[in-house]
């Protein structure tokens, strides 16, 4: 998996246009440099490629199907395909990344794995590969998220991970990420930090995007089989930090005839401020080691976003997406809580698939685009809805 | 010659730097603490600009920053508090903080205000060296502002040499792999690291910080470096009940 050359991918210093880079204190430099100096060589080695490929196939269950959704297509008078990342082991696209990073961690001789998690999907995917490899695992999770996401906390514990509560700030994903970074500062020799999205200092955004790029690599092959053409007219994906979108867009970035639609969470509505739509409400700044767009106060304090979906509840966005937004290569939309919920119920009733709340935001964008009857539209269905049943049950009880 | 260089010219050892967060415990305590610290004999003061997400800091400094933000502290407010500082304060004063609030405030305005208030140096741990060289070095030097770089036990020697070349004030030697206030005391392993740096005979003065909390650790650190920096322990001392002035003076006299 050699680095593709594209003006929309990271340059040698990890910049996407003006965004990206590594804005980190000296205390993190050793760990980040060690990774930066080694990750490409490891990822391009035959040993890594064959191990990664075989784990994705036999353990994760790839390739994930590309499913033509007939009734959804009829509803929107176009041709809609769903990339079924929800069928992966552990229930989302997150595992594509953790399988790759754990192999890199092992190659670097690391004994202890740390991770941050919001809703718990990345935490579960990390705990899973740590169990698989027999490595110690510590997952940082906001204290508030721990109380909101009990089933995933239990899964991580059953998988042998220690779940540590981040008790500072608003006790959500941003704070969990801060705590994970502090842990890494305090453990500069034996610990590897598996970041769950295309965020953080270089080389993380690039490394994670490459590990997720299997999504669009498969899409091309599957689309050719099904439609006779490798390229669709649209690829639609939700964006919090943006790892599933980065993976779904990756191999189409330079094919400018493919419209790349990134859907952010608008919470209660962008005009209310209770939103997580970073490209709408954010300004350029620095978060978690990266220069990007982020939600902040006039004084430059990072603010708390809001979304019903814990996986999209992040005040920044990966630098790859900040650049897709400012360069207008990406078409950015946002969907409110209500629109996402309605899209989740629509997919469930039309196709018998219960999506994760995050993926429901991508589906909600279908209403916001005028498709032609001959268009081919791929929606990246990044995760399944099991973890969101409590939210869905509440909606059903209200109706 | 700026105040930092003057200080290191005149005083060769046991230089005490204290760190506190602007706007803590109360919004308008900043100048009081500064004055008390100078009167009590602190050689340098670092004022922290509070940030919502201080990655390099441990719980004590984080909590003081959260409280300061709650009190309404901001960079604009801080410069307002410091505008007449030089009428009363003669020791070197540095600002320490993170990039995002400075970027948001605006670099040009920020540097103008530093010059106006008489700030001697900046410590911005997440400002990359390359970016300092390309975008800021000339601007800092023009107004006599020193950028203070950090080194850690993991920093390779050649990088330390490069930092030494770029430094115009002093080098901030982080005593161990940790966030602020996380560890206390000095281990044999740390002494080996301190010795390694001492033997490099750097041109810049070196101050040791992180884990320095009392007279014992201060004196021990000063055996290896020109001075030491106390942050978390100083913050704990000033938040005790009673007069801030008395708390500051009691703490500093317990060190010196």
Image (cartoon, coloured by chain):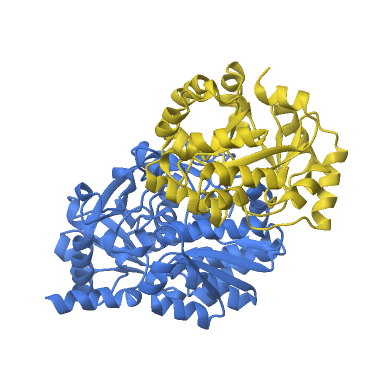
Q: Residue at the bottom extreme?
A: A158
The answer to whether any part of residue A216 appears in the image is no
Q: Is residue B73 above or below residue B164?
A: below
Extreme-right residue of the structure: B199
Is B106 drawn above or below residue A272 in the view shown?
above
Residue at position x 72%, y 33% in the image: B163
The residue lying toward the viewer, choosing from A339 and B181, is B181
Q: Say if residue A61 shows up in the picture.
A: yes
Percent x, y of residue A223: 36, 60
Task: Give the image location of residue A392, x and y in percent.
Answer: 24, 75
State the quadrant of the C terminus of chain B: top right
Figure check: A391 above or below B140: below
Q: Which chain is blue?
A: A
Most foreground residue, A49 or A128: A128
In the rendering, at what x and y percent does residue B71 appear?
A: 38, 45
For the N terminus of chain B, give its image quadrant.
top right
Q: Residue at x 19, y 61 (%)?
A: A339
Q: In terms of image quadrants, where is residue A327?
A: top left
Quarter of image, res A356: bottom left
Residue B131 falls left or right of residue A150: right
Where residue A168 sits: x, y (%)? Answer: 46, 59
Which color is chain B depicted in?
yellow
Image point (69%, 48%), residue name: B254
């Amino acid at each position: 998996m050699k680095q593709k050359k594209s003006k929309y991918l990271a340059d040698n210093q990890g910049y996407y246009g003006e965004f990206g880079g590594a804005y980190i204190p000296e205390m993190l430099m050793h760990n980040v440099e060690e990774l930066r100096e080694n990750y490409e060589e490891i990822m391009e080695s035959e040993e890594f490629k064959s191990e990664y490929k075989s784990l994705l196939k036999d353990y994760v269950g790839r390739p994930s199907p590309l499913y033509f959704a007939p009734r959804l297509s009829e509803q929107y008078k176009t041709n809609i395909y769903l990339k079924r990342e929800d069928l992966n082991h552990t229930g989302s696209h997150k595992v594509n990344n953790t399988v790759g990073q754990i192999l890199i961690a092992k190659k670097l001789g690391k004994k202890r794995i740390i991770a941050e998690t919001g809703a718990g999907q990345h935490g579960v995917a990390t705990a899973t590969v740590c169990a698989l490899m027999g490595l110690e695992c510590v997952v940082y999770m906001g204290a508030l998220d721990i109380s909101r996401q009990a089933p995933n906390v239990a899964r991580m514990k059953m998988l042998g991970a220690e779940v540590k509560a981040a008790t500072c700030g608003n006790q959500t994903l941003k704070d969990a990420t801060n705590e994970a970074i502090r842990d890494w500062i305090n453990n500069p020799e034996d610990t590897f930090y598996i970041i769950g999205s295309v965020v953080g200092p270089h080389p993380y955004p690039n490394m994670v995007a490459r590990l997720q790029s299997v999504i669009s690599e498969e899409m091309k092959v599957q689309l050719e089989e099904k439609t006779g053409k490798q390229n669709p007219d649209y690829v639609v994906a939700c964006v919090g930090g943006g790892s599933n979108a980065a993976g779904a867009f990756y191999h189409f970035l330079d094919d400018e005839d493919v419209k790349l639609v990134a859907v952010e969470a608008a919470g209660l509505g962008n005009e209310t401020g209770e939103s997580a739509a970073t490209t709408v409400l954010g300004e350029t700044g620095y978060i978690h080691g990266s220069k990007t767009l982020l939600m902040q106060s006039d004084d430059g304090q990072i603010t708390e976003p809001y979304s019903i979906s814990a996986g999209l509840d992040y005040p920044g966005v990966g630098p790859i997406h900040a650049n897709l937004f400012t360069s207008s290569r990406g078409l950015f939309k946002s969907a409110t809580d209500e629109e996402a919920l309605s899209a989740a119920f629509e997919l469930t009733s039309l196709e018998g698939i219960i999506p994760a709340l995050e993926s429901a935001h991508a589906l909600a964008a279908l209403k916001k685009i005028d498709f032609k009857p001959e268009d081919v539209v791929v929606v990246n269905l990044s995760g399944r809805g099991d973890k969101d049943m409590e939210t869905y049950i509440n909606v059903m009880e209200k109706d | 010659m700026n105040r930092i260089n003057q200080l290191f010219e005149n005083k060769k050892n046991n230089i005490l730097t204290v760190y506190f967060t602007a706007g803590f415990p109360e919004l308008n305590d900043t100048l009081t603490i500064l004055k008390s610290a100078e009167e009590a004999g602190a050689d340098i003061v670092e004022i922290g600009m509070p940030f919502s997400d201080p990655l390099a800091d441990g719980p004590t400094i984080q909590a003081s920053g959260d409280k300061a933000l709650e009190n309404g502290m901001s960079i604009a407010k801080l410069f307002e508090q410091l505008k007449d500082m030089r009428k009363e304060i003669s020791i070197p004063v540095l600002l320490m903080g993170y990039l995002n609030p400075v970027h948001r405030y605006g670099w040009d305005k920020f540097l103008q205000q530093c010059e106006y208030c008489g700030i001697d140096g900046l410590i911005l741990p997440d400002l990359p060296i390359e970016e300092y060289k390309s975008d800021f070095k000339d601007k800092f030097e023009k107004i006599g502002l020193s950028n203070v770089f950090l080194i850690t036990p993991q920093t390779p020697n050649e990088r330390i040499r490069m930092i030494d070349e770029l430094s115009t004030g002093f080098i901030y030697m982080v005593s161990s792999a940790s966030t602020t206030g996380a560890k206390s005391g000095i281990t044999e392993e740390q002494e080996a690291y301190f010795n390694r740096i001492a033997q490099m005979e750097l041109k810049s003065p070196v101050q040791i910080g992180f884990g320095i909390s009392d007279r014992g650790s201060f004196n021990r650190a000063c055996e290896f470096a020109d001075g030491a920096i106390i942050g978390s322990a100083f913050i704990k001392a000033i938040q005790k009940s009673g007069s801030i002035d008395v708390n500051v003076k009691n703490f500093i006299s317990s060190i010196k």
